[in-house]
């Protein structure tokens, strides 16, 4: 066994000198081939339209909560400049803070809602949501009377006229839970609950892992799978940092009760667009607010109470059916 | 230090040494990995829209592979426990192949998570704000990286000692081996908890998922190692004792049986109760409202697992050929069961009752294949380097040429670990 | 041929295989450069909804004054005609005038339940008190007590403007700004386009909106048997 091995080694050494040059050439060419193939493989990156970060400074910026007001102001101005560049629209960006002594609540009258989807499209317009791929914060589900199982509902209903007999309609959006699972699971604290109960997302901090989307029991969180597209003429120029400023690809977004409006005292866009007056919004801590009155006097319920999220979005029915003679509940 | 760099340089050179089959295999893996890289670059440019994922099914093939590979990584412990706790002799020399596979598997896991992210450029946000201990994802980041380090340390140290021709100091690796044993269980438990803790997804929100994860991992992991050992035995000079493979076969048999039992328990609870929470399970097994994309997958998985189990129970599976078949069936079966069969149905229907079916796109599939190829590339290199070192052909006083000139010498020194 | 020679042969093969690898890499590089990345982006045409369709105001126009009509170039209110003659028949009947009105108000089938018999520019409460059009909710509330009570505190009806009255003006719409007093049930209405989310098939454009045989991927299929539906 030993001898052939020795022979083998000697033969190898002898052949080695002559082979060195050829071997070197061969290795070099193979190596060059590898490098070329690698370079070719990453070549699609040259088409990267939107730089991942606006700037290096952007990349190194600390978490939003750590920023001073001054830093925030510069940041807002930068974003406004970017929006101007991208969409050619002059916009104002700020970030109104929570109003002390206010906790928002939403109530929706299922006896009134007729499923016309005005809220959905008003929301899209107000909050500069992407039109393609389409992102909508509100999903209206058409439910057959007599069931409460969402799995019986229809999402793409398209009758000529609504309401459809023997159906009721259940719009679902972010429930602004008091115990939000999405906030709990976010690995980088890109989403948090503010003092007025609104759960916000910092689009500049989100890493796009979509764990919150898996955690949300209301399917309220939406992901920018591609660069959002918003027609220039439909940009809502009244923007806030944590709400309706244009988003980038690869981050989450969701309903924030129109905080750019509501924190300035106004009602949310979906509410104002609702032709039936089914939507009610206000301060839960004020006993005379419309929502407080509803919570006190109506039979209310929250969706999926069993998952323990304690939503601030309440559904209620009127005591009787609507006057078109068709039961809504 | 210089000596260590020298060691790394030698390892690097050795990884290019081999016959044409070795080079073909490595070229094949590199090419697939580059295809994957190319696909990932396309995804980076266009966004995750290049995948089949949607707002409805927001996790797909990437996370499916991730959960599966976490299990494979954890399964290395199934070699470690018999060796270090029960002092099993046959597996003693082979345990390092399991640990090396754990390293490769964890690298694949981390890559799968990275390609799944919408904004991988913001990975550093994890360092600035880390939602620990609330977010299970942060737990996963910690346990996976620590497990990677533990295994790198154990393997690296043992190999380096063999390279230096000295006995490894027990205190410098035995404690880590025991930590790694516990840690292996933890990586898989944490990954299961990541899914189990979500109240909005009844399909995941059940305690049996974590034990099932571990059982299926401990079936598929050692099955993969059996395959590796059979290949090593066949194409290298390294002799794998038949007894070692028999021990592993028994491990796989027990784990696969437990896995089947847990699956039956789960299915009974779900279908006998027949509650509203059944929708996802029904979608997976029988389809829902005419949507049945996953039905062929899960039945394939079940039949593969069953056939594998039957083969393993028969004495005939002592034949390596048949054993390999059983192992392949088991790995594929568990991959489907834990990947497509566990991740996707939880999203179908959505929490508000919408059904959107998920189909992986070409681009997405290429990325997955690329990562697998890269992982196998890493593993092959590790094994390629380890074998000559452990058999004493690549040591501190010997040049790489010795490996080259004695490619298939059967001389073998006892590994000193 | 001995095993060793065989191995050596293979080793040489392994060496020259480097060229194969090099060629392979260059082919791969060429392939990357020459092929377009797979375009599998299911982007659909954005759904355009005109801003005017979304009415962020009152559902109907209603004035706090009796409606004004222009007849012969002159602005007329109810009394312009009704003071000229007396309406004698004080019981439900088929109207000769106002034929555009359909009275579909449940049990309330008589004009003078709400309109005053003397002064047609006024409405009347059940106790006979004449009231102006600005007090419509009070009138409706005489029958619709619970709804009126709800409306008073803001539970029923639509509120516009500011939820916080300290920060801006709040408008509470009155009954007739949403309900037609003669046919108060809320009418059925057209709906806006449904979701068009990713990978749910083609957009709405190609689909006959009233044909329920949609792309199976896109549409949820209604449960086959719904006891409530079959009853009808």
Image (cartoon, coloured by chain):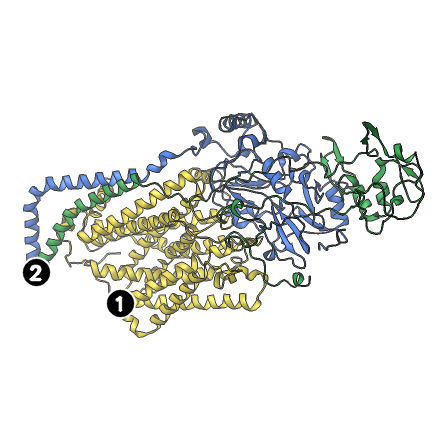
Chain colours: A blue, B yellow, C green
Query: Dot 2 corresponds to which residue?
Result: C2
What separation in Å lies between label 1 and label 2 (alpha carbons)? Answer: 27 Å
- Whether residue B57 is visible to the viewer of this picture, yes or no, is yes
Q: Chain of mark 1?
A: B
Is C181 placed left or right of B63 in the picture? right
| Label 1 residue SS | helix
x and y, in percent, of residue C131 in the image: 89, 37
- The total number of labels drawn is 2
The dot on residue C133 is none
Query: Dot 1 corresponds to which residue?
Result: B320
* Mark 1 vs 2: CB contact within 8 A: no
User: Considering only vertical position in the picture, is C108 above or below B322?
Assistant: above
In terms of depth relative to the viewer, which is nearer, B227 or B40? B40
Do discs 1 and 2 belong to a common subunit? no
Is C231 placed left or right of B402 in the picture? right
Residue at left offset 67%, top offset 34%: A99
């Amino acid at each position: 066994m030993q001898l052939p091995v020795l022979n083998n080694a000697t033969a190898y050494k002898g052949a080695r000198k002559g082979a060195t040059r050829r071997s070197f050439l061969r290795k070099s060419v193979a190596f060059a081939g590898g490098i070329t193939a690698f370079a070719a493989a990453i070549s699609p990156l040259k088409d990267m339209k939107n730089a991942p970060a606006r700037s290096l400074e952007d990349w190194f910026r600390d978490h939003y909560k750590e920023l001073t007001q001054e830093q925030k102001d510069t940041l807002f101005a930068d974003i406004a400049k970017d929006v101007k560049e991208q969409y050619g629209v002059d916009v104002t960006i700020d970030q109104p803070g929570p109003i002390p002594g206010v906790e928002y609540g939403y109530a929706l009258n299922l006896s009134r809602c007729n499923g016309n989807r005005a809220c959905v499209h008003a929301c899209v317009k107000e909050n500069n949501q992407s039109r393609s791929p389409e992102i909508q914060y509100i999903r209206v589900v058409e439910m057959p009377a007599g069931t409460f199982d969402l799995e019986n509902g229809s999402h793409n209903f398209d009758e000529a006229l609504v309401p459809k007999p023997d159906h009721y309609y259940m719009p679902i959006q972010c429930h602004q839970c008091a115990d939000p699972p999405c906030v709990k699971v976010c690995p980088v604290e890109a989403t948090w609950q503010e003092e007025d109960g609104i759960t916000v997302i910092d689009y500049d901090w989100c890493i796009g892992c979509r764990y919150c989307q898996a955690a949300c029991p209301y399917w309220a969180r939406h992901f920018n799978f591609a660069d959002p597209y918003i027609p220039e003429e439909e940009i809502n120029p009244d923007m806030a940092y944590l709400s309706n400023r244009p988003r980038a690809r690869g981050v989450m977004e969701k309903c924030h009760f129109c905080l750019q409006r509501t924190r300035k005292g106004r009602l949310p866009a979906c509410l104002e667009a609702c032709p039936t007056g089914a939507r009610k919004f206000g301060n839960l801590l004020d006993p005379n607010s419309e929502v407080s009155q509803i919570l006190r006097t109506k039979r209310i319920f929250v969706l999926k109470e069993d998952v323990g999220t304690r939503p601030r979005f309440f559904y209620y029915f009127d005591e009787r059916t609507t006057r078109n003679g068709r039961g809504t509940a | 230090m210089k000596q260590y760099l020298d060691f790394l340089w030698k390892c690097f050179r050795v990884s290019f040494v081999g016959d044409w089959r070795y080079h073909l295999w490595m070229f094949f893996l590199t090419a697939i990995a580059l295809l994957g890289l190319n696909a990932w670059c396309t995804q980076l440019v266009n966004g995750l829209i290049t995948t089949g994922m949607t707002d409805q099914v927001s996790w797909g093939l990437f996370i499916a592979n991730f959960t599966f590979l976490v299990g494979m990584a954890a399964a290395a412990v199934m070699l470690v426990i018999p060796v270090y706790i029960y002092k099993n002799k046959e597996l003693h020399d082979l345990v390092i192949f399991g640990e090396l596979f754990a390293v490769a598997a964890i690298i694949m896991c981390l890559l799968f998570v990275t390609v799944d992210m919408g904004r991988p450029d913001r990975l550093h946000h994890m360092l600035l704000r880390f939602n620990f201990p609330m977010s299970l994802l942060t737990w996963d980041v910690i346990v996976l990286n620590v497990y990677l380090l533990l295994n790198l340390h154990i393997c690296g140290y043992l190999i380096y000692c063999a390279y230096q021709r000295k006995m490894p100091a027990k205190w410098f690796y035995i404690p880590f081996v025991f930590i790694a044993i516990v840690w292996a269980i933890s990586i898989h438990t944490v990954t299961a908890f990541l899914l189990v803790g979500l109240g909005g997804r009844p399909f995941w929100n059940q305690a049996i998922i974590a034990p099932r994860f571990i059982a299926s991992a401990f079936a598929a992991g050692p099955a993969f190692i059996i395959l590796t050992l059979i290949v090593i035995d066949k194409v290298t000079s390294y002799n794998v004792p038949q007894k070692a493979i028999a021990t592993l076969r028994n491990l796989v048999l027990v784990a696969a049986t437990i896995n089947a039992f847990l699956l039956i328990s789960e299915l009974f609870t779900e279908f006998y109760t027949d509650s509203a929470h059944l929708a996802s399970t029904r979608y997976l097994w029988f389809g829902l409202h005419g949507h049945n994309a996953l039905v062929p997958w899960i039945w394939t998985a079940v039949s593969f697992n069953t056939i594998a189990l039957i083969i393993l129970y028969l004495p005939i599976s002592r034949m390596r050929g048949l054993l390999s078949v059983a192992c392949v069936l088991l790995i594929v079966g568990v991959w489907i069961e834990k990947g497509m069969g566990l991740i996707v149905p939880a999203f179908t229907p959505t929490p508000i009752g919408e059904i959107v079916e998920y189909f992986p796109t070409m681009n997405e599939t290429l990325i997955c294949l690329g990562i697998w190829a890269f992982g196998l590339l890493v593993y092959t290199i590790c094994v390629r380097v380890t074998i000559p070192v452990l058999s004493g052909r690549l040591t501190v006083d010997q040049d790489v040429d010795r490996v080259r000139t004695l490619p298939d010498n059967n001389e073998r020194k006892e590994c000193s670990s | 041929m001995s095993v060793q020679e065989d191995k050596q042969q293979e080793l040489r093969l392994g060496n020259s295989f480097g060229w194969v690898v090099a060629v392979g890499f260059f082919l791969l590089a060429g392939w990357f450069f020459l092929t377009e990345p797979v375009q599998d982006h299911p982007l659909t045409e954005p759904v355009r909804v005109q801003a005017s369709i979304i009415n962020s105001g009152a559902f109907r126009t209603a004035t706090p004054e009796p409606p004004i009509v222009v007849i012969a170039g002159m602005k007329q209110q109810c009394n312009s005609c009704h003071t000229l003659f007396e309406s004698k028949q004080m019981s439900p009947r088929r109207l000769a005038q106002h034929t555009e009105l359909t009275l579909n108000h449940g049990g309330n089938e008589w004009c003078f339940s709400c309109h005053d018999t003397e002064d047609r520019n006024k409405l009347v409460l059940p106790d006979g008190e004449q009231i102006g059009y600005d007090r419509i909710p009070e009138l409706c509330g005489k029958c619709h007590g619970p709804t009126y009570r709800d409306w008073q505190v803001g539970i029923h009806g639509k509120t516009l403007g500011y939820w916080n009255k300290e920060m801006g003006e709040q408008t509470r719409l009155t009954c007739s700004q949403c309900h037609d007093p003669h046919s108060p049930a809320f009418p059925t209405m057209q709906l806006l386009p449904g979701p068009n989310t990713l990978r749910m098939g083609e957009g709405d454009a190609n689909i006959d909106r009233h044909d329920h045989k949609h792309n199976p991927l896109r549409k949820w299929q209604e449960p086959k048997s719904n006891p409530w539906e079959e009853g009808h």
